[in-house]
Amino acid sequence: MTRAPAPPFRAEHVGSLLRPSELTQAFRSFNTGAISAETFAEVQDKAIREVVVIQESLGLKGVTDGEFRRASYWGHWVEAIEGLDVAPSLFTFHDDCGTEQEFIAATCTGTLKQTAPISTGEFAFLHSVASATPKITMPSPSTLHFWRLDQTIAGSGYASDEAYLADLITIYRQEIAALYDLGCRYVQLDEVPLIMLANPENRARVTAFGSDPARLRTLYIEALNQTVAERPADMTAALHICRGNFKGKWLTEGGYDDIAEAVFQGVDVDGFFLEFDTQRAGGFEALRHVPTGKKVVLGLVSSKIGQIEDPIVIRKRVEEAARYLPIESLSISPQCGFASTVAGNPITEQHQIDKLAALVRLAEEIWGAD
């Protein structure tokens, strides 16, 4: 009997998908008290069933629930953990017009204690309706620290970042173990701060706020490793490195070179999802630092714009990447999710479907069927 390939698969997507209009309206209605939690959950269940069918019909081997139960890719962690709250970030999103967008981020107000399920309920339902491999995404530990730097733990009672992250990582390990017990074999951590620290302007900003960029990089790599250190051998852990994704805007730009060796050789995951959709992401040269045996999912298709990429161009880019890493170690995907928040990116659901379908077709042309 041929053993099914382990993820990441040849054609992937990062995780979040555009919320259908009925679900978007349900979020509004629930937040204003117009519908009950039970009614809200029914709308979510229906939308998830439908989006799983769409993914599987496109030929995707790994599927998600589109993050349809979440208001944002990280907010459910704050909601489930006592001692976490939100406050203004020290950083802003940007677009091509120079517009800046402020946002809120996690902050710590006291000793951390998980008081509600985080993503186990999400997975249990997804697992019950999916035939393909279900994937759960979660924010990296740094996501719950970096955006407010030293202000994150000010007044929290934690004496150091290390002490705060130690308690946070305990919750992550418990979550991963609980997911495994439910049948989860594929988790992905979404990481923005490490690529923020690859940009000299961001490092200068971090320094100006009184933090040490080099120390943070080491701290966040160690946090990732501690988070996944106890995962069972048959559970795949992937790291998605993202430059920010909010209504088509981004947080940073620049290549991977300044962090490539430290991250690709230092983070103990099975694969990396890397953005390469625009010149903001730099070239493929940094892939030479990826160790043998690790997989790389090339984010060559934009989730931020509706224009459908030319498959000939995408294939050539895969061939360019294969100069630095064997093509058998590569896969393809959009560069990020289509909707890191309920609002989503400025594209249509049909654009989303067309982009995913094109990726599946191209992956089969390059590598054959999984």
Image (cartoon, rainbow, N blue to C red):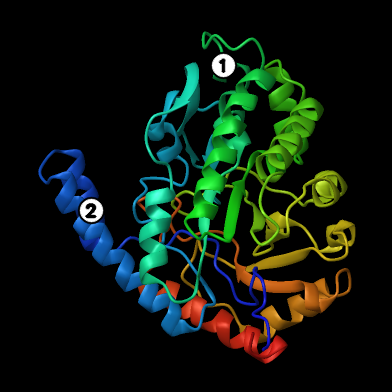
Say whether residue 300 is visible. yes
Q: CA distance from mark 2 to mark 1?
A: 34 Å
Residue labelled with disc 1: 153
Q: Quadrant of the N terminus?
A: bottom right
- Residue 210 drawn above or below residue 275: above
Left or right: 36, with 7 as reference point: left
Say whether residue 245 is visible. no
Where in the figure is residue 203, as x and y percent of width and height? 75, 30
Left or right: 292, with 252 as reference point: right
Tell how many labels: 2
The answer to which image quadrant residue 294 occupies is bottom right
**Which residue corresponds to the image point at 69% horizontal and 55% vertical from the top-left?**
280
Where in the figure is residue 166, as x and y percent of width and height? 64, 26
Amino acid type, mark 2: Ala
- Tell which circle, 2 or 1, labels the residue nearer the N-terminal end: 2
**Which residue corresponds to the image point at 56% horizontal and 16% vertical from the top-left?**
153
Residue labelled with disc 2: 41
Q: Quadrant of the C terminus?
A: bottom right
The answer to which image quadrant residue 144 occupies is top right
